[in-house]
Amino acid sequence: MRAVDIIIKKRDKEELSTQEINFFIEGFVSGEITDYQASAWAMAIVLNGMNLRETTDLTLAIARSGATLDLSDVVDIAVDKHSSGGVGDKTTLVVLPVVAACGLPVGKMSGRGLGFSGGTIDKLESIPGYRVTLTTEEFKKQLKQIGVVLTGQSLDLAPADGKLYALRDVTGTVQSIPLIASSIMSKKIAAGANAIVLDVKVGLGAFMQSLDEARLLADTMTRIGEMAGRKVKTLLSDMNQPLGFAVGNALEVREAIDVLHGSGPVDFREHCLVACAHMLLLGNRADSLEAGKKLAEQSIQDGKAWEKFRQLVIAQGGNVDVVDKPDQLPQAKIVEVVKSPQNGYLSQIHARLIGEASVLLGAGRSKKTDPVDHAVGIEVHHKVGELVEQDNPLFTLYANDQTRLREAQALAMSAHQWQEKPTSPLPLFYN
Ligand code: URA
């Protein structure tokens, strides 16, 4: 078999066999198949798709490309969560400590930013000292000791995904149902999850722009999960506007801390509580969604979720003083409040444009080797449907460079649209 023939076959819209998919993934991980061949292959998949059989084969090949974790000696049921990627999505930072505080041990491997969408690992690295590379032994030991782990994808788990994910980020090959579904599900299967809550984002700031596409992605992942013997619950959540207000690494950590203290943006808090409720239900710690939500709320109110977050930061070497006093998180040199140029009801706060503006400021990457500036980002001040008056604050830019600030300002301004007539707020979830 030759890699080039497999690329050509997919370019010509043909179905790949299990052997061809296995050959490609094994060759890519061993280095025999080059980055440029894998990029061309990924582009052929973006353009011509894969059927469910091919996608399942791809998922299993990626999951098998490294070690697999068995958590059965540490937790009775390993529940995991994953978001398909969005703007301002810092949900994991809240959900993990909350769920752990409710008595469900949870260990998660998260990713870095991808294109305009942020990544939990980049956010966590805003906390000085926080280690995002744990060994499998450290992962299990910490899960046993404090019931919560939040780390980057370890190099030995699904290494094919790590390599492919970094290439896709910079070759325009993120947006593809088979590639996203196999990327997410391979990681979850390799990381030993028995049950998985999948938060599929839909809208302008998501990889899935329409509800139909999002449903197809949700359905694809559910079917892959079923074939691999995992329980899967998919949520379809809105990503037309940023989740919460903060977009950018340290800014988002701060907003997550607010929610763990019982305040923070209403939409973000509610989103987190719903995700927690589903996890607690799947993990048999609650017998209904209502009960799960109450449990989650209670853990925030009584400070147990916050204490769990502190334990997590300490266990992974992070400076806990910084989360206790979030003013010590990385701070941008320039903070500029931009005012609304007109009166009106906000009809759009285009999440992708806000995400791209944040990347322009340095919060994300254009090349896979680009460093990330943890201090920079954008705070929007409104939600769709709100009435804004001229000269009221519209958004705040946090920057470390004047030229980037100006470019990001123009882009973030273009993300906002107004109308004269009242318009409804956006839903948090879709059916
Ligand atoms: N999240 C992932 O883990 N993989 C993707 O491809 C997209 C979002």
Image: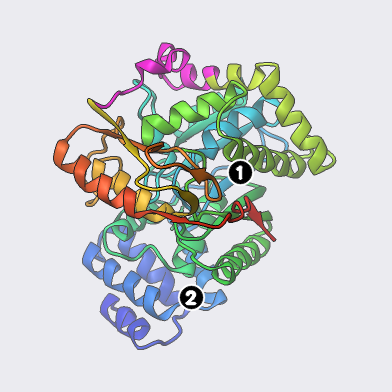
111 and 6: which is toward the camera: 111
Circle 1: residue type:
Asp
Query: What residue sits right under mark 1 in the picture?
Result: 80
Q: Which residues are magenta?
A: 310-332
Mark 1 or mark 2, whichever is nearer to me: 1
Q: Residue furthest left?
A: 403
- In this rendering, is residue 75 above or below 40? above
Specify whether 353 is left or right of 386.
left
Asked which quadrant contains residue 127, the reply is top left
**Secondary structure state at the residue bearing disc 2:** helix
Report the image quarter containing ligand 1: bottom left
Q: Does any portion of residue 47 appear in the rendered image?
A: yes
Please name the colour scheme applied to the rendered image: rainbow
**Secondary structure state at the residue bearing disc 1:** strand
Query: What residue sits right under mark 2 in the picture?
Result: 18
First in sequence: mark 1 or mark 2? 2
Quadrant placement of the N terminus: bottom left
Q: Is mark 2 within 8 Å of ligand 1?
A: no
Label drawn at residue 136: none
